[in-house]
Structure formats: C-alpha cells, structure tokens
Image (cartoon, rainbow, N blue to C red):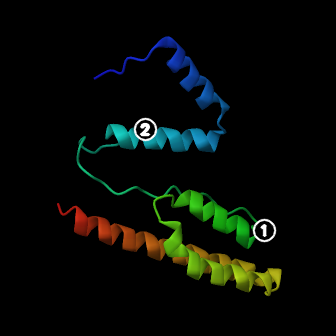
C-alpha cells in the first residue's frame, strides 16, 4: 500500500522533518511506525505505546529529570502526574542539591508506576 503525495507536499514534509532535531525525528519515526502497525505486530492489533527511556545525565537537576521523563513517557496523561510530581518538585526547592538524586529516583518511580497503570488499563480495554 503506497501513499501518493503531490511533489510540493512531499517536499514540505521532508523540509519539516529535516528542521527537527534528532530526538524529534526519532519521535516522528516511532509515531509513523505505530500508525503503520510495524515493529513485529500485525497491523490492526492494538498495542500499548512503549516508553522511550533517555539516560539520566550526570548532575541532572530535578526539573530536567521531569522534562526527560515526560519525553520518555509521552503516553501518560500529564494531569494524572501533576499532583505527585508537583509535590516532588516543591521538595526540590527546599532540599540541598546533594539530595536531588533521591528526588529524581522518586520521580522515576512515579512515572514507572503510572506506566504500569497505563498497561493495566490497556490490557483491560484490549484483552487478547
């Protein structure tokens, strides 16, 4: 199944893709593959969106960790994370920076737990 595009729309799409940074291009590529049903799954079979973990850079700040985790878990609704994540962010403002790795670990645990809830809900909605 091929997609036919007018030359100008293809060129525009290509120009837009080239303007993205490498991380954004990977996200677009993952999204396109999801839409096409590639990646070892049969087209049309629903599957959960997988996290795209990024390595935590040395000396990472809590805010940067929050941003990294949002990029890593784009499928999680931000409103469900807002309360608990805000609490951790507020603690970071009054905590010495030496203790920030523990707060970042709490953020990572929070995102991981919410992803597990996402998977559980997905399983209920899409039984195999």
**Is 102 positioned to the left or the right of 49 in the image?**
right
Q: Residue shown at 60%/77% (left/top)?
A: 85
Is residue 89 rendered to the left or right of residue 31? Answer: right
Lower sequence index among marks 1 and 2:
2
The residue that label 2 is drawn on is 32
Compare residues 127 and 12 and report the one nearer the observer: 12
Q: Quadrant of the C terminus?
A: bottom left
User: Is residue 109 toward the left or the right of residue 67 in the image?
Assistant: left
Distance, label 1 to label 2, CA atoms, is 34 Å
Tell me what residue is drawn at x 22 percent, y 61 percent.
126
Q: Is residue 55 left or right of residue 116?
A: right
- Taking the spot 60% from the left edge, 43% from the top edge, the residue there is 24
Q: Nearer the viewer, residue 38 or 124?
A: 124
- Camera-near label (1 vs 2) is 2
Residue 28 placement (x, y as % from top left):
51, 40
Secondary structure of the residue carrying numbered label 2: helix
Q: Is residue 32 above or below residue 63?
A: above
Q: Quadrant of the N terminus?
A: top left
Give the residue at x 54% y 25%: 13
Mark 1 neighbour density, 10 Å: few (under 14) some (14–19) many (20 or more)? few
The residue tagged 1 is 59
What secondary structure is found at the residue carrying circle 1?
A: loop
Which one is in front, 93 or 38?
Answer: 93
**Residue 118 image position (x, y, % from top left):** 38, 68
Q: Quadrant of residue 70?
A: bottom right
Which x, y percent locates residue 121?
A: 31, 70
């Amino acid at each position: 199944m091929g997609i036919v595009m007018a030359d100008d729309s293809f060129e525009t799409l290509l120009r837009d893709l080239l303007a993205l940074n490498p991380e954004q291009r990977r996200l677009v590529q993952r999204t396109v593959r999801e839409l096409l049903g590639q990646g070892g799954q049969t087209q049309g079979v629903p599957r959960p969106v997988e996290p795209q973990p990024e390595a935590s850079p040395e000396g990472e700040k809590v805010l940067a960790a929050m941003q990294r985790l949002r990029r890593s878990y784009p499928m999680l609704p931000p409103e469900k994370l807002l309360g608990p994540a805000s609490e951790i962010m507020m603690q970071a403002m009054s905590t010495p920076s030496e203790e920030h790795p523990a707060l970042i670990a709490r953020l990572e645990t929070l995102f991981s737990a919410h992803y597990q809830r996402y998977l559980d809900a997905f399983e209920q909605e899409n039984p195999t």
